[in-house]
Image (cartoon, rainbow, N blue to C red):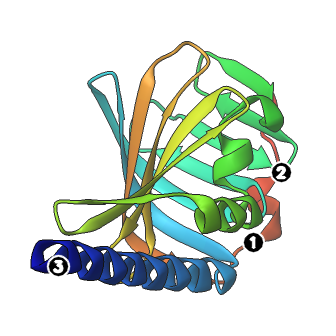
Amino acid sequence: MIKLLSIFFFLVFNFQANAENREKIIENLKNTSNLSFKFEQNINGKIENGNCTIEYPKKIYCEYDKNNKILVSNGKSLVIKTISSYYLYPIEKTPFNLILDKNFLINKIYDLNEKIIDKSYLNYTITENENEINIFFDLNLFNLIGWQTKDIYQNTTLTLLYSVSTNQKIKKKLFNLPRQN
């Protein structure tokens, strides 16, 4: 009987902790209109670094440290441009359609199970439209700190955020799509 009561109290405490984490993450997301950050991106072992700005909903601008590569979404289309290439995708065909939609994230987080990783990070796994996206939050500050996706070529991409600033003044034209060379 004592063993059964111990399990019951553990489950109740764990459920309450999960609910508190979830509420703090959702509150952070609701209060965030934009993020600026440095990133490290690992695509099948190939590491790239750079700086990004996200403006909700669905806008992102990233400059990579090497290759003169930029990634831009104006909320409808996503462009990846390098010196020698230019790729244009409808955003709804990419995982960014979900990652950059904070209302979608908030609604999903209400219903998802959380995993605590290394006593430091919270992970929520979202499966939507044949996409599996792992979203990571800091367990202490409840800020978005990264995501893991598979791209259209089935490459696993892990993006980690650091030096994150929220609700900064940003130029609206930052999210204008670049022209093709």
Choose mark 1 or mark 2, whichever is in front: 2
Label 1 crowd bin: few (<14), some (14–19), many (20+), radius 10 Å: few
Q: Is residue 115 left or right of residue 31?
A: left
Residue 75, numbered circle: 2
Task: Look at the image and tell me whether residue 53 can be seen.
Answer: yes
The mark tally for this picture is 3
- Three-letter code for the amino acid on which mark 3 is drawn: Ser
Residue at 26 percent across and 24 percent down: it is: 45
Vertical arrangement, residue 131 with respect to residue 139, above or below: above
Residue at 15 percent across and 76 percent down: it is: 1
Q: Secondary structure at mark 2?
A: loop
Q: Position of residue 154 (x, y in %)?
A: 51, 15
- Which residue is the site of mark 1? 171
What distance separates the C-alpha of mark 3 from that of mark 1? Answer: 55 Å
Q: Position of residue 24 (x, y in %)?
A: 50, 85
Residue 26 occupies which quadrant of the picture?
bottom right
Residue at 67 percent across and 26 percent down: it is: 130
Contact between labelled residues 2 and 3, with CB atoms less than 8 Å apart: no
Q: Secondary structure at mark 1?
A: loop
Could you say which is closer to the camera, residue 136 or residue 8?
A: 8
Which quadrant of the figure contains the C terminus? Answer: top right
Contact between labelled residues 2 and 1, with CB atoms less than 8 Å apart: no
Contact between labelled residues 1 and 3, with CB atoms less than 8 Å apart: no
- Which residue is the site of mark 3? 6
Could you say which is closer to the camera, residue 39 or residue 114?
A: 114
Residue at 41 percent across and 84 percent down: it is: 16
Q: Earlier in the sequence, mark 1 or mark 2?
A: 2
Q: Secondary structure at mark 3?
A: helix
